[in-house]
């Protein structure tokens, strides 16, 4: 999951530094970065919802905080 974020940041850095890219390329990369973020959030929240109380304690979350986060829809930060 972290790997996707690194690639996304690198791609956006290239877009910010290059002025000659076509508009469709800029929009496509930004759209792909947004979808990647949404997919990562969804996958993380689905997994978080399956963790046991002792596992949540290891990552510093209460079961209620985990349930609140897991109930969020993918587009909510």
Image (cartoon, helix red, strand yellow):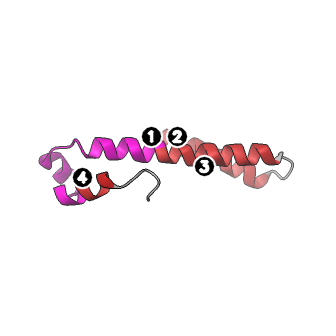
Q: CA distance from mark 2 to mark 3?
A: 9 Å
Q: CA distance from mark 4 to mark 2?
A: 22 Å
Circles 2 and 1, Cβ within 8 Å, touching? The answer is yes
Quick one: 50 or 15, which is closer to the camera? Answer: 50
On the image, the x and y values in percent for residue 36 come to 53, 43
Quadrant position of the N terminus in the picture = top left
Q: Is residue 55 above or below residue 69?
A: above
Residue 60 shown in magenta: yes
On the image, the x and y values in percent for residue 28 come to 70, 43
Circles 4 and 1, Cβ within 8 Å, touching? The answer is no
* Sequence-earlier tag: 4 or 1: 1
> Residue drawn at (61%, 42%), measured in percent from left and top?
32
Residue neighbourhood size for the residue with mark 1, other residues' Cα within 10 Å, grouped as few (<14), some (14–19), many (≥20): few
Q: Which residues are magenta?
A: 39-66
| Secondary element at image label 3 | helix
Circles 2 and 3, Cβ within 8 Å, touching? The answer is no
Q: Which mark is residue 59?
A: 4
* Sequence-earlier tag: 2 or 3: 2
- Where on the picture, by quarter, is residue 61? bottom left
> Residue drawn at (60%, 49%), measured in percent from left and top?
9
| Secondary element at image label 2 | helix
Q: Which mark is residue 4?
A: 2
Q: In the drawing, does residue 31 fall left or right of residue 24?
A: left
Q: In the drawing, does residue 40 fall left or right of residue 6?
A: left
* Sequence-earlier tag: 4 or 3: 3
Q: Which mark is residue 9?
A: 3
| Residue named by callout 1 | 1
On the image, the x and y values in percent for residue 76 come to 44, 58
Residue neighbourhood size for the residue with mark 3, other residues' Cα within 10 Å, grouped as few (<14), some (14–19), many (≥20): few
């Amino acid at each position: 999951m972290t790997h996707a974020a690194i690639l996304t940041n690198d791609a956006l850095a290239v877009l910010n530094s290059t002025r000659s890219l076509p508009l469709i390329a800029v929009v496509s990369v930004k759209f792909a970065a947004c979808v990647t973020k949404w997919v990562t959030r969804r996958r993380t929240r689905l997994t978080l919802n399956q963790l046991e109380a002792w596992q949540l304690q290891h990552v510093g979350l209460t079961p209620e905080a985990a349930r609140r986060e897991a109930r969020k829809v993918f587009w909510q930060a």
